[in-house]
Image: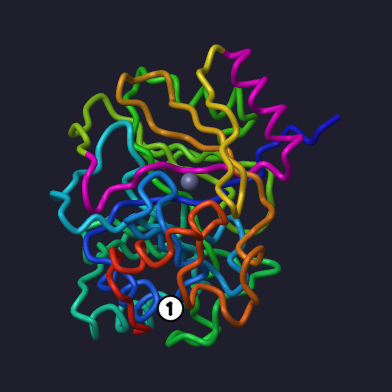
Amino acid sequence: MPDASLPGVHHITALCGDAQENLDFYVGVLGLRRVKTTVNFDDPTTHHLYYGDAAGRPGTTLTFFPWPRATNGRGGAGMVRTVAFAVPPGSLAHWRDRLAAHGIEAEDKTYFGEPRLHFSDPSGLPLALVATAPVEDATPWTDGPVPADRAIRGLHAPVLPVFSDDRTAALFTDVFGWPRTGTDGDRVRLQGPGTGVGTAVDLLVRDRHPSGRMGRGTVHHIAFRAPDSEAQRAWQSILREHGLQVTDVKDRHYFRSVYFRDPTRTSGLLFEIATDGPGVHVDEEDTALGQSLALPEHLESRRAELERALPTLSVP
Ligand code: ZN
C-alpha cells in the first residue's frame, strides 16, 4: 500500500514584479536562502526563483515567477491570500525592528493564540511571521543576515479566503483527511498529518470576499507533499474518484507534479501535489544552490538565448 497521506504543504508559488527587488527582499530582509535560480518551464524566458531553509526542503519553499510588466493583483476568494512563515517564540520584537529598519510597517495580530506580524512584500503580497512553538529538526538558513535564534523555520499556515457555502473545508477534511483542529472567529485551521513546518492551512470563511485578480503580489498556486511517485499516483486516483479533474504527471525537475482545481468555485484555487524528491540538490552541490542559472536538460541547448533574455541578478 502506498502511503496515501498528504503530510503538509510542499511549496507556494506567487507572482512578483522585479526579480532583483524580490531577491533583495526575501534573501536580504527575510533572510531566506535562495535555493534555486531557474526558469518557468512553461515560459522559459521568465525566471523561477526558489527560497527556502538551508536545505531547501518541502514545507519551507516559496517560489516566484517575476512578471515585471504585470499589473497589480488582488488576493481574494479562490486564491491563497496570505503567505505565513514560522519564526521562533519571542522573536517578533526583533522582526518588528528589522522590518521597520527596512521601511516596512508591520501590524500585530493574534490568531489561534499565536502572535504574528502582518506586512507586505515589495510586490504587495501579504505576508505573516507567526511566533510558534519551537520546530523540531528545523534547518534555518544562518549564513544570511538573520541570526539563527530568529531565522524563519519554514512555511506556517497560509490563509485561504473561502465562501461560507464553499466545499473547500470538506475537500481538506473528507478527501485530504486533514481534520479541523481549531476555529478563531471566522478562521478555521485544518491540520495535515506531517511533522515540522508547513503542515496546516487556515480557511477564512465569510459570506463575502473581494473578488481576486491574478497579478503581481498574488499567489499562483499551492502545492501539497506526496512522499513519492507511488503516493502521488494514489492521490491522482483518489482525487479522480472524487470527481476532480487531475492533470497527468509533469516533470518539474526538482519534483513531479499533478494539478487540480478546488471545484467549489468557478475560479477555484489551483492545487498541486508534488513529490518530495528528487529535490533541489539534484543538479547542484549544496554550496552552489541557487547561485547560477539551473536549467533542465531539455532547455540546456537554449542556455545562451535564455541568459540573454533574463535579467542579470546580483546577490543582495
Ligand atoms: Zn508548484
**Residue 87 at x, y percent in the picture:** 49, 70
**Residue 198 at x, y percent in the picture:** 56, 53
Front residue of 294 and 286: 294
Q: Which residue is mark 1?
A: 31
Give the color scheme: rainbow, by chain, secondary structure or one colour. Answer: rainbow
**Residue 43 at x, y percent in the picture:** 35, 48
Placement of 88 over or under 49, stated as above or below? below
Q: Are there few (<14), some (14-19), or many (20+) residues within 10 Å of tag 1?
A: many
Q: Quadrant of the N terminus?
A: top right
Front residue of 97 and 310: 310
Label 1 CB less than 8 angstroms from ligand 1: no
Q: Quadrant of the C terminus?
A: bottom left
Considering the numbered disc 1 on the image, is that residue within a helix, a strand or a loop?
A: loop
Asked if residue 223 lies left or right of residue 184, the reply is right
Placement of 18 over or under 104, stated as above or below? above
Residue at 59% across, 58% down: 197
Q: How many marks?
A: 1
**Residue 249 at x, y percent in the picture:** 60, 33
**Quarter of the view holding residue 145:** bottom left
Residue 226 counted in the magenta span: yes
- The kind of residue on which mark 1 rests is Gly
**Quarter of the view holding residue 304:** bottom left
Residue at 48% across, 50% down: 157
Residue at 34% across, 30% down: 162
Residue at 35% across, 63% down: 305
| Residue range of the region highlighted in magenta in the rendering | 214-242
